[in-house]
């Protein structure tokens, strides 16, 4: 166990203290308008895509928040906002009490990026095929000026690889010599090189076989226990989320519609969309039972419905749902954005 991990645990706030990660009304819009001349000739206005529209959550130190939802709901955009790849259109992200996006634009950027790292979705695209493994894993150490001595650097890279279940002898190999699961382990070793406190994991197992997924997830959970890591885990796989998370946020068209502890969400889901997602999962003991498929399709994000974005697919929608957008409110021990739950109609 590293000295850094001991420091993190010693510095961990007591229960009830301020969370490590806080997102407040985080939003990101993209201009997807046609070229200027086309807009003038066709008299078309500018068009904005609201990929993330007012997302708020907190993550306590050493905990895992999972974000789930259908493709295109804004999960990956949230990830890129947190690591500074995107500038927010609105809202804020605080890390350990510090405004992260102000820090990303200042001289403190390098120090903050050392504490926040990201594991990308595709291990076949996120590793440079022309570099050997030792150069890939050592890159963050070079960039942050953490280690200059060649012998010490090799020793540190060897320890990082061994920490994710690989061998020191793998340092001289190239990415094409590894399987998908092994490549993702290399990505994890690279992310851990700067001894970060917060890891943003953007569907890190979705490109892997099921048996390999379990190995990678177990490595990540073991690293979290040993080093006191905090995770934002993004996935569309609810079985994976159930295995790794402490809290779960369900996203729909750029907004969080339910935020709850793992056991509460899987045991007693509140939002109709959450119920629909969970009811679509096959279960061994429910063989032969009629299941409710996920109804309808996600609306066009360029022209979302008025009111609650889920109302065209919701069996409980009424006139209020069609005109008034629900807010994420504490209801029944969770946070949920739903008029039907608020009014007791579900």
Image: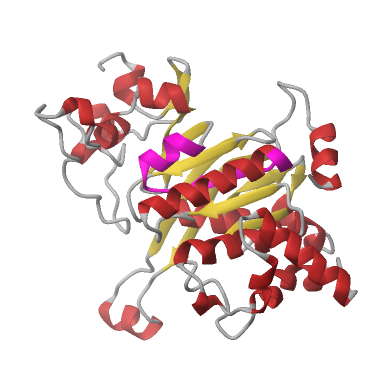
Percent from the top left, x then y, of residue 79? 54, 54
In the rendered image, is residue 318 in sight?
Answer: no
Residue 225: image quadrant is top right
The residue that appears at 79% across and 35% down in the rendered structure is: 9
Percent from the top left, x then y, of residue 12? 79, 32
Residue 251: image quadrant is top left
Q: Is residue 183 above or below residue 13?
A: below
The residue that appears at 27% across and 46% down in the rendered structure is: 305
**Relative side of 214 to 271, left or right:** right
The residue that appears at 29% across and 75% down in the rendered structure is: 43
Residue 207: image quadrant is bottom left
Between 31 and 145, which is closer to the camera in this rendering? Answer: 145
Q: Quadrant of the N terminus?
A: top right
Start and end of the magenta stretch? 226-244
The residue that appears at 50% across and 38% down in the rendered structure is: 244
Percent from the top left, x then y, of residue 173? 61, 78
Percent from the top left, x then y, of residue 70? 32, 49
Coloration of the structure image: secondary structure
**Relative side of 40 to 177, left or right:** left
Q: Is residue 1 above or below residue 58?
A: below
**Relative side of 238 to 249, left or right:** left
Residue 137 on the magenta span: no
Counting labels gives 0
Q: Residue furthest right?
A: 149
Q: Quadrant of the C terminus?
A: top left
Residue 243 on the magenta span: yes
In the rendered image, is residue 85 in sight?
Answer: yes
Q: Is residue 150 above or below residue 95?
A: below
């Amino acid at each position: 166990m590293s000295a850094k991990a001991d420091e993190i645990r010693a510095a961990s706030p007591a229960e009830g203290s301020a969370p490590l990660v806080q997102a407040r009304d985080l939003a990101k819009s993209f201009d997807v308008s046609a070229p200027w001349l086309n807009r003038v000739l066709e008299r078309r206005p500018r068009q904005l895509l609201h990929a993330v529209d007012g997302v708020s959550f907190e993550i306590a130190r050493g905990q895992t928040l999972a974000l789930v939802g259908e493709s295109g709901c804004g999960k990956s955009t949230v990830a890129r906002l947190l690591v500074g790849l995107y500038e927010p259109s609105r809202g804020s992200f605080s890390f350990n009490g510090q405004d992260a996006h102000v820090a990303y634009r200042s001289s403190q950027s390098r120090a903050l990026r050392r504490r926040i790292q990201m594991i990308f979705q595709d291990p076949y695209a996120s590793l440079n095929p022309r570099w050997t493994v030792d150069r890939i894993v050592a890159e963050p150490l070079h960039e942050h000026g953490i280690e200059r001595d060649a012998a010490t650097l090799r020793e540190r890279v060897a320890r990082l690889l061994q920490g994710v279940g690989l061998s020191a002898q793998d340092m001289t190999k190239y990415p094409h010599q590894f399987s998908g699961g092994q490549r993702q382990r290399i990505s994890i070793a690279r992310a851990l090189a700067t001894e970060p406190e917060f890891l943003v994991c953007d569907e890190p197992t979705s490109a892997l076989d099921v048996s390999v997924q379990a190995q990678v997830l177990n490595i990540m959970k073991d690293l979290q226990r040993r080093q006191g890591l905090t995770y934002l885990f993004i996935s569309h796989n609810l079985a994976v989320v159930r295995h790794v998370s402490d809290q779960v946020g369900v996203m729909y068209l750029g907004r969080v519609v339910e935020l709850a502890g793992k056991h509460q969400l899987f045991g007693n889901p509140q939002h109709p969309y959450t119920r629909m997602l969970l009811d679509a999962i096959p279960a061994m003991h429910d063989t032969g039972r009629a299941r409710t498929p996920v109804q309808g399709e996600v609306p066009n994000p360029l022209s979302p419905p008025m009111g609650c974005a889920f109302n065209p697919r919701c069996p409980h929608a009424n006139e209020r749902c069609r005109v008034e957008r629900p807010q994420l409110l504490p209801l029944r021990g969770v946070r949920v954005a739903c008029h039907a739950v608020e009014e007791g109609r579900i």
